[in-house]
Amino acid sequence: MKYLEIPIEVNGSVEDARLETYILDTPVERIQIKKRPMIVICPGGGYEKLSYREGEPIAMQFLAKGYHACVLRYSVAPARYPVPLLELGQVMRIIHSHAEEWRVNTDQIIVSGSSAGGHLAGCAATMAENKPNAAILGYAVTRGEDVQMCESTAPDVISAVTEETCPCFVFATCNDQLVAVENSVNFLQALAQKGVTFESHIYAYGPHGFSTGDTSVQNREIPLCSRVPDWVEDSIGWLKDVLGDFGENTMTEPVCKAHVSGDYDTFLSWDCTFGYLRNYAGAETVMTPFLAWLEANKDMLAEKIGPAAQELVRKNGMEGLYFMADSRSFREILNHTGMTKAEKQQIEEALEKNS
């Protein structure tokens, strides 16, 4: 492994701002891994200081799973926001410029942060010009009024969530007495409203700032849910789902898309929800004949979906079927129709032409 310290400097940076970089050896003649993901870790500290417990200990966990890792010692007081976000932007440029040398897969760059560092990771996920491919937010400060208590010039993250926000993994504890759990819950709600893929673990109890939850960094006398340390393994499993896993010579394809449906893609497809396509004017040439067919065959389709759909169609006709079908992908609805693969492919191609 190679360890590098790289000075970070933007307008307003403090003198010791730096990137602590851990680059794993990747001997391609012996291991079938050509490039690795990179995780950028942003410790917490209320934008007043930086917690070392939330830096290197977390980096070591991801290194053990085959990820390159780096810890951003971003500028804190007297530096003011947006200096930390600008520094994170510089880090992204550094990683891209050294991608070949360090053997980094630039489609698999993750930003992780704890507490105020979670706010910074949230800003990267929602506002940065060069967004990461995924973000991990631990007991993060996201609500405007809580953010203001840390840094008066820093923005609310929740209101910044858009369809362009990258997939997020969020964890916290219910009884965090420093950063209320609503910071995480409200952020998750915003992600859901924009269709952004996320995974969340809200543990029953535990203090603020537990880092990995391991006894090497957390006082064993302080009550902590026994499952809190699982967030590391769970987040790595989630990253494999949304970014891909190590495969032979390359990374595998993700099994989970960045959005929960195709409604947020720039083109129409059968991954869009049935309700979205049914109400979208640009899909009329495809959906109008299909809806006519559906009305004539609603009982058959309801039977294939299940007893609840049958009962709704019996009571409410087509409106009952729409109630059951609108939130499902068009792909799933087509799979219940008995159409051949070629017929479904024709519909897919017609949707793309109408995008």
Image: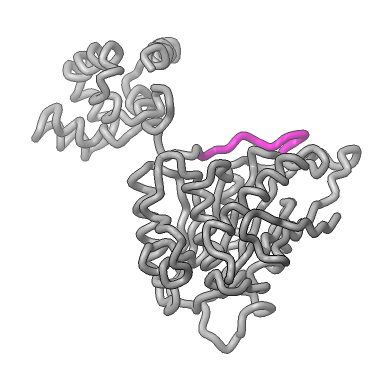
Residue located 19% across and 23% down the image? 298
Residue 46 rendering spot, x and y as whole percentages = 53, 72
- Residue at the extreme front of the image, as rendered: 11
- Residue at the extreme bottom of the image, as rendered: 221
Residue located 41% across and 40% down the image? 163
Rendered image quadrant of residue 307: top left
Give yes or no for residue 88 being in the magenta stretch.
no
The residues colored magenta run 247-256
Residue 91 rendering spot, x and y as whole percentages = 67, 50
Which SS type dominates the magenta stretch? loop
Residue 155 rendering spot, x and y as whole percentages = 43, 58
Residue located 80% across and 59% down the image? 5
Residue 239 seen in render: yes
Rendered image quadrant of residue 340: top left
Q: Looking at the picture, tell me which residue is in the foreground, 54 or 322.
A: 54
Q: Say if 186 sits above or below 215 in the image.
A: above
Residue 61 seen in render: no
